Image: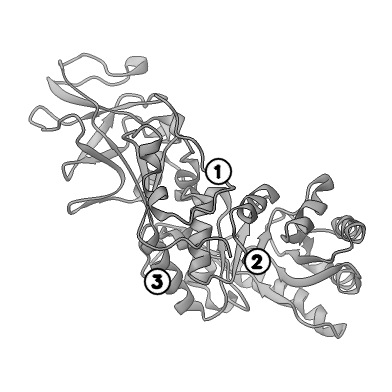
Amino acid sequence: MAAAPPPDPRETHADLDALRHRHAEAGDRPTRIRVDLDALTHNLRALRARTGVPTMGIVKANAYGHGLVPVALHLQAQGIEQLGVAFVEEGIALRQAGVTVPILVMGGIFGPQAAQFIAHDLEITVSSLSKLRQIEAAAEALGRKATVHLKIDTGMERIGVHSYSAGPFIEAAVASRWCEVKGVYSHLACADDPESPMTERQLARFLEACAHFERIGAPMPLRHLANSGGVLHFPQTHLDMVRPGIALYGVLPDPASRPTVDLRPALSLVSQVVYFKVVRAGHPVSYGATWAPTQDTRVVTVPIGYGDGYPRSLSSRGAVLIRGRRYPIVGRICMDQFMVDIGADGTAYNEDDVVLIGAQGEARIRCEDVARDAGTIPYEILVGLNDRIPREYRGGAIAPAA
């Protein structure tokens, strides 16, 4: 079966109808991702109402599987103040697609990338004094100042200067002729747990590091710390800007935590029944012969598998919705297909819709449910859904290039 072509980052995607029907142009594959842009708008407004400060919408990893360019253009149309990505390639793709709002690349620079950031008007994460010097050299060579955000490590031990030794780093950045310090930030390690004391410790470390700007008489840049967990559970971390990621897409960072904002899932994953057969008792299904029915039953085949990013760990553990009823996945999930037991009395026909994530009638399978069954986190489910699956966009508006 032919794979769907990935979105061309050079397109403006101003034509929403073209986005909605991209799957048809790709051969009308029955498996598709549906993205509800109105749900995205609802979530953005709900998060803004909770925080009251500017929002940096995180669109890294293909906008958490929702589609980098269409989601970014939609958020731009909704007036979002800033976007965040992980790598410079993502930022360049957005610029080429007509995204004009500020974009922070949070992963920093690798090797000689600094010039690419500056040339495409991308804001740079500075995670060390040596990185600062690289950026300065590139900016001077281009004759253009670089816009930077200083990364302070308050407990992740990932990238960034330790909060307790940030003074000289801050002083060097403030004194730089070729870098304009727009922001200073850190990342919360445990904010998805509202009971964790780690968040308060990180906040205190971050504020102490930020106080160095005042000690040296420098203007305070934008301070941003709150990820989705911080936005939902720790209002004291909202500061000058927030960085929601998974919550923006209507999924809780920790399914076990209590919702504090009305969020609506923006993504549905759907397919269709493509084959139906009666399987006799004792006849094994799929690779490895790991499952066989104890009585004659009806089994249907669904054309999606781990080659699309649907986890193989859902083999004989996951479930789908067909005609509003929940049925189990049986046997091992294949690269391109899996099988579902609809029971001896079950009814399903070829081309019946199959919902893997989303609602059908009164029944719903949440991304969080899929993650639980797969033994992982919702983030991994969403970002794992690859470009072999066509995406449809419904509702909302996608802004053309300015």
Secondary structure at numbered mark 3: loop
Mark number for residue 8? 1
Q: Residue 354: percent from the left, percent from the top?
A: 25, 39
In the image: residue 118, left or right of residue 339: right
Q: Is residue 27 visible?
A: yes
Q: Distance of mark 3 from mark 2, alpha carbons?
A: 26 Å
Q: Distance of mark 2 from mark 1, alpha carbons?
A: 21 Å
In the rendered image of this protein, does residue 61 appear above or below residue 176? above
Looking at the image, which is closer to me, 287 or 191?
Answer: 287
Crowdedness of circle 2 by 10 Å Cα count: few (<14), some, many (20+)? some
Q: Earlier in the sequence, mark 1 or mark 3?
A: 1
Crowdedness of circle 1 by 10 Å Cα count: few (<14), some, many (20+)? few
Q: Amino acid at mark 1?
A: Asp
In the rendered image of this protein, does residue 402 appear above or below residue 307? below
What's the residue at 83%, 45% (across, down)? 111
Q: Residue 94: percent from the left, percent from the top?
A: 61, 54
Identify the residue position indicated by label 2 in the image.
Answer: 102
In the image: residue 278, left or right of residue 179: left
Q: Residue 286: percent from the left, percent from the top?
A: 32, 19
Q: Amino acid at mark 3?
A: Val
In the image: residue 149, left or right of residue 265: right
Identify the residue position indicated by label 3 in the image.
Answer: 261
